[in-house]
Amino acid sequence: MLLNINKRHMSLIFLTIAILFLLAGLLVLLNHFSVFNRLGARPDTNRVRIPILMYHHFADEGAPGTTISAEAFEGQIKALHDSGYTAVSFDELYDFVCNGAALPEHSLIITIDDGYGSVYDTAYPILKKYDMKATVFIIGVSHGKTVYKDTSYPIIPRFDDAEALEMVKSGVISIQSHSYDMHQYEPYETGSYRVGVMQMEGESDDEYIKAFTEDYQQAAHQIQEISDNYPFVYSYPFGKYNELCENLLKDMGVKVTLTIVEGINTVVRDSPDCLYGLKRYNVPGDMTPEKLLDKISHQ
Ligand SMILES: [Zn+2]
């Protein structure tokens, strides 16, 4: 009798141990195949997928790839807002990567290149209405102007100091750099001119380093004066860049650089290098809200 009870107890103990081993094995397997991650129960909060949109000019008429009407822009911003997207600033992105801060679910970033007056007149009120932030990249030499540098060639007018400050103070807009004068183009330039920030033919490395460094510093000081914020994000004119200027910008305290390569970005906590050479989606004026949502959610 005593022997029988002991035997039964022993069997129960073995059975319990076997079940525990089986459960442990199952947990290891589930974790291995990331079942929890796929179910969303334990998302990887250290990696975030972040689409960055790129706009330029807001008007009814203009170059189709870089101009969007107020109506079409509002349609896109409303659709993003209604679909649960939050447009965050680069400060928030940087704080996620480097300072342990959280980012809202479905974050994206809206960028606007060149600093046209239509940002103030058209885009800013719409962004404010839907509580979506944006970052504007100004070309220093053209800021506040209606003509190209010291010529009489008319250009699309740029917003001025007072408008810039109002937008920045609202918290909706951040102003960052698109170079001071490394955004040159024909037909305004005569003779040989620099293509974006690229080194010119016959320019020595030392000359190039000096030119690029001085250009950035001039741009950064101007932005500090206009917006009371020292910039830390750089949008490469025409998306052209090289390793040397990336390193120079890093040395000057730039934390984020932007290209015009299309695609999604994944940023990783405690990996500050992931913030260099970020990709962007250009949003043309004829892109429907549905197509935009599809583009940023499936790639
Ligand atoms: Zn540009």
Image (cartoon, rainbow, N blue to C red):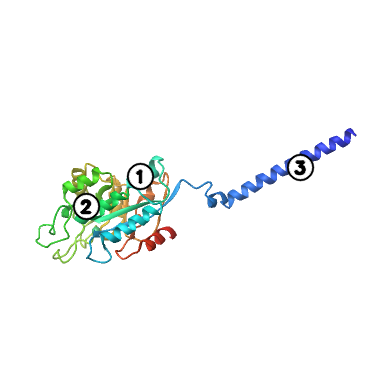
Find out if the beta carbon at label 2 lies less than 8 Å from the nearest ligand 1 atom.
no
Q: Position of residue 48 (x, y in %)?
A: 43, 50
Label of residue 92 in the image: 1
Per the image, the residue denoted by label 2 is 120
- The residue shown at (32%, 61%) is 283
Instruction: Check the picture and name the quadrant holding the N terminus.
Output: top right
Number of marks drawn: 3
Per the image, the residue denoted by label 3 is 15
| Mark whose residue sits in front, 2 or 3 | 2
- The secondary structure type at the circle numbered 3 is helix
What amino acid is at disc 2?
Answer: Tyr
Q: CA distance from mark 2 to mark 3?
A: 73 Å
Q: Residues within 10 Å of mark 2 (few under 14, many from 20)?
A: many
| Mark whose residue sits in front, 1 or 2 | 2
Q: CA distance from mark 1 to mark 2?
A: 23 Å
Q: Residue furthest right?
A: 1
What amino acid is at disc 1?
Answer: Glu
